[in-house]
Structures are given as C-alpha cells and as structure tokens.
Image (tube, rainbow, N blue to C red):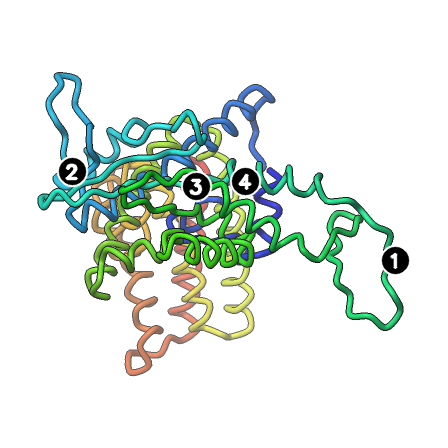
Amino acid sequence: MSFYSELRKHTSDPPKLHVYGDFLKIYDLQLSANLSEIVALQNELSVFIDDTFSIFGSYVLSKAGYFIQDVNDDSGQKLYSTKFSDEDWLNEWGSLIFMDADTGNPRAYYANKKNDQIHIFFINSLFWNKIRFLHDFSIPMISPGDIKEGEINPWKKQNGSFYGFKETAELADEIADTLMEWLVKNEQTLFIINPISESIDREIFLKAKERIKTCASDDILLSTYELINRFIKKSEEQKIVENGWNKLFNKAVSDFKSKYPYIIDCEEKTKIEKIKNNLKNAKAKLNSDNFEDAIRDAGIVCEAILEILGRKQGLTREESKNYEFLLGQLGSYINQEYGKEVHDDLDFIKKWRNSVSHPHEQSPNKNNATQVVRRAELFFELFEKD
C-alpha cells in the first residue's frame, strides 16, 4: 500500500496512530494467501479503516451527550448512540455513518437533549489523496538547473522531480476552498481529518486549518485529538473516553481478523519467531551466569505463549497482556491440554519472574535460573506440538 509506505516515513515504525493504535502494522504481514484473497482483504481493510474513523468520532460525541440523528433499528425504532453498549457499537460498525454522494466522505448530523445540532464531515484519506494526486500533476515540473547557485533552494524534490515552492500552500488552499464549499448556511459544521492524512501531511493540514479559520471565523477543521478536546473538557474524562475507545477498537479488530484466519496464522508465526529468539537469549544469559535476565527472558517466553493461547480462547488483546491474569484465566485449559505439572511449572516461573523484578526479593542462583529456563523450554516444546 502506497499510503502505508508514506506513513512510515512520518511516524514510528511500525506506525502508531491516534484512533488506530498499531493496527496498521497489519500491512507488514507476509500473508500466505492467494491473490484474490489479498485483493479482497485490501478492499475490506480500506472500508474498515474508514468506518473506524467515523465510528471514533461518533463514540467521542456520544460521551459528550450527542447522538446520531435518524438512526433506527430494523423495526423502525429510533436508536440513541448515547445509550450504546460496546456490543451495540460493534453491531453497527459499518452501518451508522453513510457516505455522502456529493462529497465522497462520510457525514452525519448529531444532536443532544438541548437540541444543539452539529453537522460533521469525516475527511477520509481517499478524498485527501485525490486532491493531493491531482494537484501534483497540475504543477509544471522544472529542471534542477533552473535554481540559481547560492540561492536557498525553493524547490521540493519529490519522486525524482522538482515542484514549485508553493506546492504546500496551494494544496492547503485547494483543500480549504473545497471544504468551505460544503458548509451549509446556519448549520454548525465541523470537518474531522483522518489521523493517517494528518500524519502524512501535517504541514498541509495546519495551513488548510488556518485558511478555513480565517474564512469561517471559527476553528472547524480538527484532528481527532482536537475533537476530544473540543467536546470532552476534563483530562480525567478524556482518559476514560480514550481507554473505552481502545477497548472497543480492540474488540472490533478481533472481529475483523476472525474473518481472515490467515491473518491470525501469520501473526502467530511472527510471534513464534520472537518467542524462539527470547528463548535463545534466555539460554545464552544462563550460560553467562546472568541469572536474573535469563529468568526475565524465560518469563517473556511463557507470557507470549499464554497470550497466543488466550487469544485463541477468546480473550481480548488487552486481557492477553498480563502473565498472572492469563495464567488465572487459562488455568483449567492448561490443566486439561498440557497437564497440572505444566501449570505448576508456569506458576513457578511466574514467582521467580516477580522475584527478580523486585530488588528486595530472593536473588536467584544458577539452579533456580536453570529450572526456570528449562521449564519455559519444555512449555514451548509442548506448545509447538499442539
């Protein structure tokens, strides 16, 4: 995906974005699937990414008391997104916000109990990239030789060609002018930019934002962070909303991936390679008498295996991040599939892992570390055979 390659230049590696977290690293996976499956997945991913963006906006507004207008269930009964449970959001993920035929962007009307109304356009990456693409090809190319010696370079090199220094400003103006055309008189309107476009074209976003602020006498082009700040005033409440969203989105991701078993298989293969490396490191540290680090790496090995087992048993991603919680939740399963001795081994590893994490606890000797590493190795061998 070209947008993903561009995104990696502007963010962490793998990219971690507001709204999406590290979900987009799915584009890094080397999937074992045929071409038709890959094409279908790419199409579904694009839809899921755009749906997630507009659902995020609706979720934030619901926490501020704004519900989506004109949403009904199958029987015609009005639905209030302010009353949605996580299950309701998941059930309505792809059907709450509709694409506007005129602009090609999702849009929705929101209202609260006071009948304050807000009209929101969710500016997706497709719209942003379309203007960007058309603009790039509308600017005449010049030769690098046209730049005078000693002059501060007013040209930006892109894909081997040189474009005019007004590119960013002109593109921002074009985006701002297009959005201003969508304003409806006497309606409070907001434009929310997708975090992907904002990360790639941060400078263009900021220039377009200022242009719109000048024309509309109001700050109405917002990032997703700014959306939360606009409607959720208190920092503690913002944290609650962010945490609630992360939990909801992780469930949505699990549902999405469950439709494509080869994604889960590929992710497991990647994790297993990391497990092997951590086990190798644990053995090396044991042989060099670095007992505490050997135990830590052995604990990482077991926690990673438990995480895979937990996901297979239906635990969410957030639930699958803690060794002690996983061991408690999977106790019966481990006893049944691997035997009580293995469960006791994992408990033994957990206790020593906790011990080396606290300086005042008992220090391990070579015998302790050897037992921990060996039991972790046996657990991995049983897991691989399963």
The picture quadrant where one finds residue 84 is top left
Question: At numbered mark 4, what does the secondary structure look like: helix, strand or loop?
Answer: helix
The label nearer to you, 3 versus 1, is 1
- Local packing at callout 2 (Cα closer than 10 Å; few below 14, some 14-19, many 20+) is some
Q: Which mark is residue 75?
A: none
Question: Where is mark 4, residue-wise?
Answer: 27
Residue at (62% x, 46% y) in the render: 5
Task: Give the CA separation, mark 3 to mark 1.
Answer: 37 Å
Residue nearest the observer in this picture, 308 or 125: 125
Location of residue 266 in the rendering, given as x and y in whole percent from the top left corner? 51, 36
Query: Of callouts 2 and 3, which one flags the residue occurring earlier in the amino acid sequence?
Result: 2
- Height in image: 290 above or below 370? below
Asked if the residue at tag 4 contacts the one at tag 2, i.e. Cβ–Cβ closer than 8 Å, the answer is no
> What amino acid type is highlighted by mark number 3?
Ile
> What amino acid type is highlighted by mark number 2?
Phe
**Quarter occupied by the N terminus:** top right
Query: Of callouts 2 and 4, which one flags the residue occurring earlier in the amino acid sequence?
Result: 4
Question: Where is mark 2, residue-wise?
Answer: 84
Task: Give the CA separation, mark 2 to mark 4.
Answer: 31 Å
The label nearer to you, 2 versus 3, is 3
Residue nearest the observer in this picture, 224 or 253: 224
Question: At numbered mark 3, what does the secondary structure look like: helix, strand or loop?
Answer: strand
Question: Where is mark 1, residue-wise?
Answer: 146
Task: Give the CA separation, mark 4 to mark 1.
Answer: 40 Å
- Looking at the image, residue 380 sits to the left or right of residue 320; the answer is right
- Height in image: 137 above or below 144? above
Query: Of callouts 1 and 2, which one flags the residue occurring earlier in the amino acid sequence?
Result: 2
- Looking at the image, residue 267 sits to the left or right of residue 323; the answer is right
Question: Where is mark 3, residue-wise?
Answer: 123
